[in-house]
Image (tube, grey):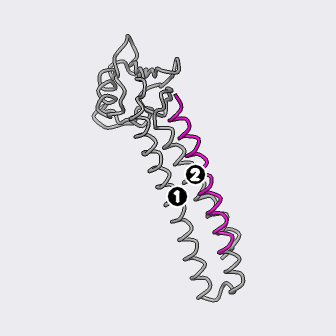
Amino acid sequence: MDFHQLVKQVDGNMQKVVDHTVHQFGTLHTGKASPQMVESVNVEVYGSNMKLRDVASITTPDARTIHVQPWDKTNLKAIEKAILIANLGINASIFGEVVRCPLPELSRERRQELVKVAHGMAEEGRINVRNCRREAMETIKEAKKSGTCSEDDAKKLEKEVQKTTDKFIANIEQHLNVKEKELTSI
């Protein structure tokens, strides 16, 4: 077992967790339009459920509006219905050949709710980072038991994994702080 590869693998897995958490933060709407807010909405088209990003082009012509332009114009109604059902707090309406989604102004209470949701997403990310650490620590323990790793090497590896864990948890905290400022600023 190559221990440098183990540290590299842990680093890669934790980076994926952070990337996913940051993507989740992008789905929270801050009063500023972003295609990420609606791209994962499930739309029932062609007899199956598909993600909105797979059936339409999503643009933000200004800071308060999202336009969804389906590649097949017959899907306009289905897209409008899917956005309304998704309960994102966005009212969708058909406007010519696009579904127009104006973003409402966020109330103080709604902003506080979104901050709580962001904290939940960050906690989920931290838990997943710690799960990556736990898996790596178990691998190190097994290597120590089987004799493929010395006690000193195991201690060094455990410190390295812990240092990597701390780095990625701090990274999630940093992204959370940015998102929180974004949500609370008017």
Local SS, label 1: helix
| Pick the front one: 148 or 162 | 162
**Residue 141 appears left or right of 151:** left
Horizontal and vertical percent for residue 25? 50, 42
Quadrant of res 72: top left
Residue appearing at x 49%, y 29% in the figure:
35
Residue of label 2: 172
The 10 Å Cα crowd at callout 1, few under 14, some 14 to 19, many 20 or more, is many
Q: Which residue is mark 1?
A: 126
Question: Which residue is nearer to you in this view: 182 or 140?
Answer: 182
- Name which residue lies at 67% across and 84% down: 149
Q: Which dot marks residue 46?
A: none
Three-letter code, disc 2:
Ile
SS class, disc 2: helix
Reply above or below: 27 against 81.
below
Mark 1 near mark 2, Cβ–Cβ under 8 Å?
Answer: yes
- Residue at 39% of width from left, 34% of height from top? 110
Query: Was residue 175 drawn as part of the magenta stretch in this picture?
Result: yes
